Image: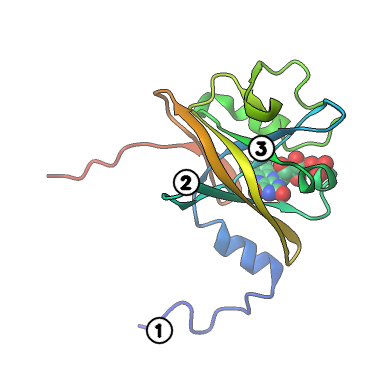
Amino acid sequence: MTHPTKNAPDPGLPLHFRSCLGAFATGVTVVAMRAPDGRAVGLTVNSFNSLSLDPPLVLWSLRSGSSVAAVFRETTNFSVSVLAAGQLGLARHFAFSAPDRFAGVAHHEGLGGCPLVDAAIAWFECETVSVQELGDHLLFVGRVLRCARVPGSPLVFHQGDFGQTTALDEGV
Ligand SMILES: Cc1cc2nc3c(=O)[nH]c(=O)nc-3n(C[C@H](O)[C@H](O)[C@H](O)COP(=O)(O)O)c2cc1C
């Protein structure tokens, strides 16, 4: 059998590259911060991931051309709210530009004034340790100062669609 990657298109082809990345299912988060002018700023992010256990580090990336790139670039703290399966509406809401995305969204304030989305299933409160411009994105690394979780099912993003997890019957 021929290996499927042998005659695969060049990864430089954006649609092909995006489609292959889409095979990797992720959770969905809202990453947020408090701007110097007091505004709560946040966006839907699925590039969030763990980086190190000791020290506790996490990472995420932000499109350099985003309307919130300038304000995030200067931030000393950010928060990550891991969305529950029932928060699909919020995932869509935070993916669109709006002057105040937190208006009407139930949230509370964490370290550094960063907003934490209510009814999420986990929260990470971070101090920014590095921001690097790589390709067309900014890579943020944060040290986790505080984190918490509650029981609940995560919202999942896979191949451009939202979903939720179902346990596999391992057939034993
Ligand atoms: C499921 C999902 C995951 C996303 N993940 C990211 C991400 O990791 N990084 C990013 O820059 N944008 C991501 N986005 C897009 C941003 O949420 C969106 O571009 C941004 O909120 C729009 O704001 P802007 O147009 O003002 O930049 C994601 C969108 C969705 C729906």
What secondary structure is marked by label 1?
Answer: loop
Q: Nearer the viewer, residue 156 or 126?
A: 126
Residue 30 x %, y %: 64, 35
Question: What whole-number distance in Å separates the C-alpha atoms at marks 2 and 1?
Answer: 42 Å
Q: Nearer the viewer, residue 80 or 53?
A: 53
Q: Quadrant of residue 3?
A: bottom left
Image region (quadrant) for ligand 1: top right
Mark 2 Cα shell of 10 Å, populated few (<14), some (14-19), many (≥20) = some
Identify the residue under disc 1: 2
Rendered view: 108 above or below 27: above
Q: Nearer the viewer, residue 106 or 108?
A: 108
Identify the residue under disc 3: 78
Residue 98 x %, y %: 84, 31
Identify the residue under disc 2: 56
Mark 1: amino acid: Thr
| Residue drawn at x 69%, y 73% as measured from the top left | 13
Mark 3 Cα shell of 10 Å, populated few (<14), some (14-19), many (≥20) = many
